[in-house]
Amino acid sequence: MLTDEELLRYSRQILLAQIDIDGQARLKASRVLIVGLGGLGSPVALYLAAAGVGELHLADFDHVDLTNLQRQIAHDSQSIGQAKVDSAMARLAALNPLVALVPHRAALDEDSLGAAVAAVDLVLDCTDNFTTREAVNAACVAARKPLVSGAAIRLEGQLSVFDPRRADSPCYHCLYGHGSEAELTCSEAGVVGPLVGLVGSLQALEALKLLAGFGEPLVGRLLLIDALGSRFRELRVKRDPACAVCGSAHGE
């Protein structure tokens, strides 16, 4: 299933016993939806394209702004004013022309989000607002698609994996409930660039583990990152049997 060019391009990760040729072939056959192409979505898209994920679906309705460039590394000064999807597609095509790119330039409503999630094998939530995160989570639960969720603000980051294919996995709503209407964004609270790069890189790693089938994904665990003190902490998260989103999805 892999060409000579692909065997050479991906040789360094094929050398890993946990991936090997079979794992690389699984990556090539995979379809992934990245929701948000900003600070988190940039490293996610770059690393998944570089790793040889066969088809990347890119969703973002925003345009590149000068203030984005401090952390959104898929874009550059020449991209200012362009749709983030178009800017990212140009960067990814230059990085790896073997990867198929599927754009979603308009904001995803309930129907289009459901269709976008159903069309892929895995979803990465790289957005920065609770409403969208809840909608993406609900669509993933309904379609039984794994969700890799990351967040970063100020000098703090979070990461977890929600996999509705597993009976023991919580969903995003189990962990965060109805959230807070007063939730801050990076434009209000600030964020340091390398932190979103770190969280996005870890999201990409979790996606590769799920797609290629190696390692232990962060299911049922929440990774907390303190960038100020360079500390990592892990919390166990259980599924809520009475969850309004995933409880009924498991027949409860």
Image: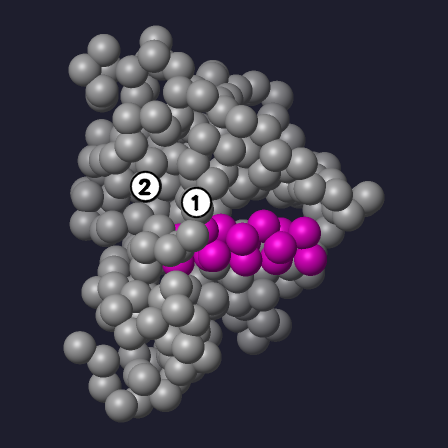
From the top left corner, tell me how far across and down residue 194 is, in percent.
Answer: 69, 57
Q: Position of residue 219 (x, y in %)?
A: 43, 36
Q: Is residue 122 within the magenta segment?
A: no
The answer to which of 98 and 188 lies nearer the viewer is 98
Disc 2, SS: loop
Q: Main secondary structure of the magenta part?
A: helix
| Residue 90 showing in the rendered view | no
Please indicate whether residue 73 sits to the left or right of residue 21 in the image.
Answer: right
Q: Which residue is mark 1?
A: 217
What label does residue 73 carry, if any? Answer: none
Out of 198 and 170, give the one closest to the viewer: 170
**Nearer to me, 129 or 17:** 17
Question: Image height check: is 1 above or below 106?
Answer: below
Residue 199 lies within the magenta run: yes
> Looking at the image, which residue is at 23% across and 80% down?
2
Please say whether residue 143 is visible from this viewpoint: yes
Q: Residue at x 39, y 15 (%)?
A: 240
Q: CA distance from mark 2 to mark 1?
A: 11 Å
Residue 208 x %, y %: 39, 58
Magenta stretch in the rendered image: 194-208
Count of numbered marks: 2
The N terminus is located in which quarter? bottom left
Do the numbered discs 2 and 1 sit on residues whose CB atoms are within 8 Å?
Answer: yes
220 or 207: nearer the viewer: 220
Q: Residues within 10 Å of mark 2 (few under 14, many from 20)?
A: many
Tell me how the rendering is colored: one colour
| Left or right of 220 in this view: 71 | right
Q: Is residue 38 left or right of residue 232?
A: left
Q: Amino acid at mark 1?
A: Pro
Q: Is residue 229 above or below residue 41?
A: above
Residue position marked by numbered label 2 in the rendering: 146
